[in-house]
Image (spheres, rainbow, N blue to C red):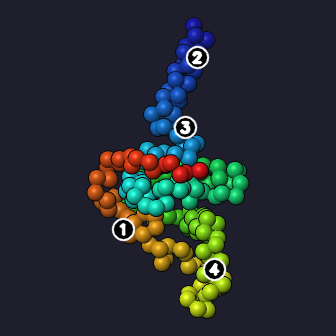
């Protein structure tokens, strides 16, 4: 009798675990689909502003916010961020205007420079003419979005920033050029 109860409890636990994976859409986080980022309504504003930006036609959230150097680094960052997001969103301990972490900002900065190599190298080579943009200046902590504030999430970031941010709509043709 004890053996049957143990098997039943084990099967029930596995069923509950499977249900939790299904209800939390956990497997969607293994993809590049930007809609995975809006499984939690807190990210709707970021998704809606990205969706209407030029970046939406060529890149996804993962391309900007995760390391692109190795598969291992990408999934380590994804796991760490996923855990931090789960804790913050489940316990409702996130700020009204979500700000990127220091580690996340470094990853985004590296990815901006990586994608826009021609532009950044041209800016550095012409720094004396047009920008105060020397290598030392970049290394001192200035980020691309210090000047390009509205790329790709708009100027103001908060839960009430975009109209209709609780009902994200699919823009036709938005994914046609994504790698």
Alpha-carbon span between mark 3 and mark 1: 31 Å
Which quarter of the figure is the N terminus placed in?
A: top right
Q: Which of marks 4 and 2 is nearer the N terminus?
A: 2
Q: Name the residue under label 4.
A: 122
Q: In this view, does 142 lie above or below 26?
A: below
- From where the camera sits, is residue 77 visible? yes
**Residue placed furthest toward the left:** 163
Q: Mark 2 points at which residue?
A: 6
Say which element carries label 1: loop
Say which element carries label 2: helix
Q: In percent of the image, x 57 and y 43: which residue is there?
A: 31
Q: Name the residue under label 3.
A: 27
**Residue placed furthest toward the bottom:** 128
Q: Mark 1 points at which residue?
A: 156
Alpha-carbon span between mark 4 and mark 2: 67 Å
Query: Between tags 4 and 1, which lies in front?
Result: 4
Q: Is residue 113 above or below residue 48?
A: below
């Amino acid at each position: 009798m004890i053996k049957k109860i143990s098997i039943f409890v084990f099967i029930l636990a596995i069923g509950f675990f499977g249900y939790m994976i299904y209800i939390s859409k956990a497997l969607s986080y293994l993809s590049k689909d930007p809609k995975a980022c809006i499984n939690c309504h807190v990210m709707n504003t970021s998704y809606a502003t990205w969706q209407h930006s030029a970046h939406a036609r060529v890149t996804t959230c993962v391309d900007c916010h995760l390391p692109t150097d190795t598969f291992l680094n990408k999934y380590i960052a994804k796991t760490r961020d996923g855990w931090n997001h789960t804790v913050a969103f489940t316990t409702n301990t996130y700020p009204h205007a979500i700000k990127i972490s220091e580690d996340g900002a470094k990853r985004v900065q590296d990815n901006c420079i990586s994608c826009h190599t021609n532009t950044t190298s041209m800016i550095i080579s012409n720094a004396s003419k047009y920008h105060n943009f020397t290598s030392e200046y970049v290394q001192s902590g200035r980020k691309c979005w210090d000047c390009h504030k509205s790329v790709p999430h708009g100027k103001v970031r908060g839960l009430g920033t975009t109209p209709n941010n609780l009902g994200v709509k699919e823009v036709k043709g938005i994914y046609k050029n994504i790698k």
